Amino acid sequence: MSEYITLKENRDFSRLYKRGKSFVSPVVVTYVMKNKSNNLRFGITTGKKVGNAVKRSRSRRVIRAAYYELYPDLKKGYDFVFVARGKTPFVKSTVVSDAIKKHMKQAGVLN
C-alpha cells in the first residue's frame, strides 16, 4: 500500500476552508479541493467542542479508518480536510464511514 500524505501546514487547511467545496453531515464535514500534484492528501481537525482528549482521539481514529477504507477508490490529485463534529465520538464507525463515502460521491472523486 502506498504512503498516505497528510496535510500539516495551517495554510493548507486555510486554503481548503476558503476555496474548497464543503459537504456537511451531522457527524463530519468534508472539504475537497483539487491540488496541483498527482497525490491524495488529507487532514483531520477536531475542535474542543467535540469533547475531551479521549473523544477527540476516537473521532480522528474513526475518520482516518474511513478514509483509508476509501483510499484505493479515490481519484488522484485531491486534498481533503475532515472536520469532526459534536456527534462524531458517539456514533458507530460505520456511520462516519457512510457519511464520508457519500461526501466523496457528491464531490465526484470516487472512481
Image: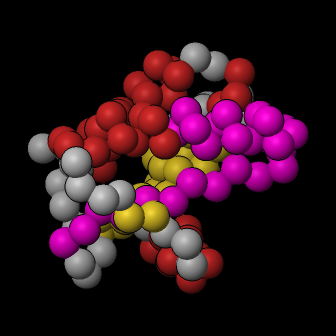
Question: Is-magenta flag for residue 70?
Answer: no
Residue 72 in the image, given as x and y percentages of width and height: 20, 43
Foreground residue among 27 and 48: 48
Residue 101 in the image, given as x and y percentages of width and height: 35, 34
Displayed quadrant of residue 67: top left
Q: Is residue 36 above or below residue 100?
A: below
Left or right of residue 59, residue 33 in this image: left
Residue 89 in the image, given as x and y percentages of width and height: 70, 29
Question: Is-magenta flag for residue 52?
Answer: yes
Q: Is residue 85 visible?
A: no
Residue under the point 58% across and 38% down: 61
Task: Give the total of numbered labels.
Answer: 0
Residue under the point 57% across and 78% down: 9
Q: Is residue 2 visible?
A: yes
Residue span colored magenta: 38-63
Q: Quadrant of the C terminus?
A: top left
Foreground residue among 27 and 67: 67
Colouring used for the render: secondary structure
Foreground residue among 59 and 81: 59
Q: Is residue 37 above or below residue 24?
A: below
Residue under the point 35% across and 58% down: 4
Left or right of residue 27, residue 75 in this image: left
Left or right of residue 39, residue 33 in this image: right
Which residue reaches farthest left? 111
Left or right of residue 59, residue 52 in this image: right
Q: Is residue 70 above or below residue 17?
A: above
Foreground residue among 19 and 98: 98
Q: Is residue 34 above or below residue 104?
A: below
